[in-house]
Amino acid sequence: MNVSALTRSRLIIAATFVVALILSVVPVPTWAEQFRPDWVGLVLIYWCMATPHRVGIGSAWLVGLLQDVLYGALLGQYALSKTIIAFLAVKLHLRVRVVPPWQQALAVLVMLAVGQLFVIWVRAIIGKPVLGFSYWTPSIVSMVVWPWIFIILRDIRRRGQVS
């Protein structure tokens, strides 16, 4: 792979993360807030499964830190959560990517739920209230939208020749 192809691949991957970060903070009605998918988690899982040699734990840490800053959260809270998600995605990518996207959605649900469990644990340690069932709806909604996200990102990867 020559330098321009490598640069193009990096820019395409970075652009998808930027779009995911923007989608995670774009204003929505209050009632719809709990139904917002974990855009960053979905994009992270896709790239970790599609290109584990290019996107992994380090990328997850960086994107998670950006998410910490955007949300005004405890610094490192989302960074560690995304790192755990990336670890699981990279570790399981050979098993998960061979099944159809609708079956991959179950693995995505588990990975995102583990990341959310970590966030709950951190919130409990610092004394913030533990949230109710509505806290889990982003993982469930993410599972539902995963097949479409998979198809869109796969098309972007193929058209951009990201390998």
Image (spheres, rainbow, N blue to C red):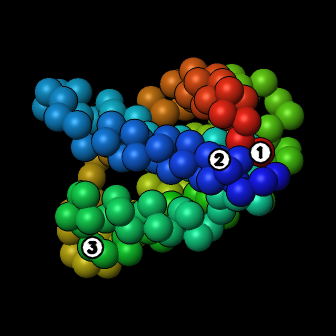
Q: Secondary structure at mark 3?
A: loop
Q: Amino acid at mark 3?
A: Leu
Q: Which mark lies nearer to you, 2 or 3?
A: 2
Find the residue positioned furthest to the left: 30
Give the vertical position of 139 relative to 114 (above or below). Answer: above
Q: Gap between marks 2 and 1, in whole Å? A: 7 Å
Q: Say if mark 2 contacts mark 1, CB within 8 Å.
A: yes
Place of residue 38 in the rendered image (x, y in percent of width and height, measured from the top left): 42, 42
Q: Gap between marks 1 and 3, in whole Å? A: 34 Å
Which residue position is annotated with label 3? 74
- Residue 163 is labelled as 1
Q: Amino acid at mark 2?
A: Ser
Place of residue 113 in the rendered image (x, y in percent of width and height, measured from the top left): 52, 49
Q: Gap between marks 2 and 3, in whole Å? A: 31 Å
Q: Secondary structure at mark 1?
A: loop
Residue visible at 62% across and 67% down?
Answer: 57
Q: Which mark lies nearer to you, 1 or 3?
A: 1
Which residue position is annotated with label 2? 9
Q: Amino acid at mark 1?
A: Ser
**Which of 120/5 is in front?**
5
Residue visible at 67% across and 50% down?
Answer: 4
Q: Secondary structure at mark 2?
A: helix
**Which of 70/11 is in front?**
11
The 10 Å Cα crowd at callout 3, few under 14, some 14 to 19, many 20 or more, is: some
